[in-house]
Image: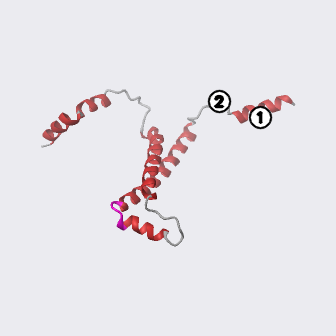
Amino acid sequence: MYASLYRWMDDRLGIGEIYEDISSKYVPPHVNIFNRDSPLVFTSFLAQVTTGAAMTFYYVPEVTRSLPSVYAITYETRHGWAIRSMHRWIASIMVLSLVCHVNRVSLVSAYPSVPCRSELLAIRCRSIK
C-alpha cells in the first residue's frame, strides 16, 4: 500500500528527485542539531509575523472591547483558535530556540574575534593622549 502511494506521489510531485538531491549533499561530521537553531529562530519569527498579522484583522485594541475580540477570534472566527494557538506556541518555541542559540554562540565562542568599532575608537582615543 505504501509503495503504491509513494509511486503515485513520485509521479505527480517528483519526490524521488527531491530525496536524491537532499541525500546527495555532504554534511560535515561536526554539524548537529545545535547548529540548526538560528534558522529555527528566523522561521519562528516569520510564523509569528504571519499569525499576528492574521489576528490583527479581528483584534480591537480598546480597553472595553479587547477581551470580547479575543473571544471572537478564539471561538467565532473560522480557524481562529488554531491561529491563536499557533501564535502562542510559536512564541514559546522562538524564545526557547533564541536562548539556545545565544548560549551556543557564547559557549562555543562562535562570534568573530574582530574588535568592534567602539573598541577601536577607545584604542584610538587612548593613543591620542
Residue nearest the observer in this picture, 123 or 91: 91
Q: Quadrant of the C terminus?
A: top right
At 40% from the left and 64% from the top, the residue drawn is 73
Residue 54 placed where, x, y %?
42, 55
At 43% from the left and 50% from the top, the residue drawn is 50
Amino acid type, mark 2: Val
* Mark closer to the chain start, 1 or 2: 2
**Residue occupied by mark 1:** 122
Residue 90 placed where, x, y %?
43, 53
Span colored in magenta = 75-79
Furthest residue toward bottom: 64
Residue 123 placed where, x, y %?
77, 31
Residue nearest the observer in this picture, 54 or 35: 54
At 77% from the left and 34% from the top, the residue drawn is 122
Is 126 on the left or on the right of 48, as rendered? Answer: right
For residue 21, what is the image quadrant?
top left
| Secondary structure under the numbered disc 2 in the rendered image | loop
| Secondary structure under the numbered disc 1 in the rendered image | helix
> Would you say residue 106 sits in the magenta stretch?
no
Amino acid type, mark 1: Ala
Is 123 on the left or on the right of 13, as rendered? Answer: right
Q: Is residue 75 above or below residue 23?
A: below
**Residue occupied by mark 2:** 114
> Mark 2: few, some, or many residues within 10 Å (few <14, many ≥20)?
few
Q: Main secondary structure of the magenta part?
A: loop
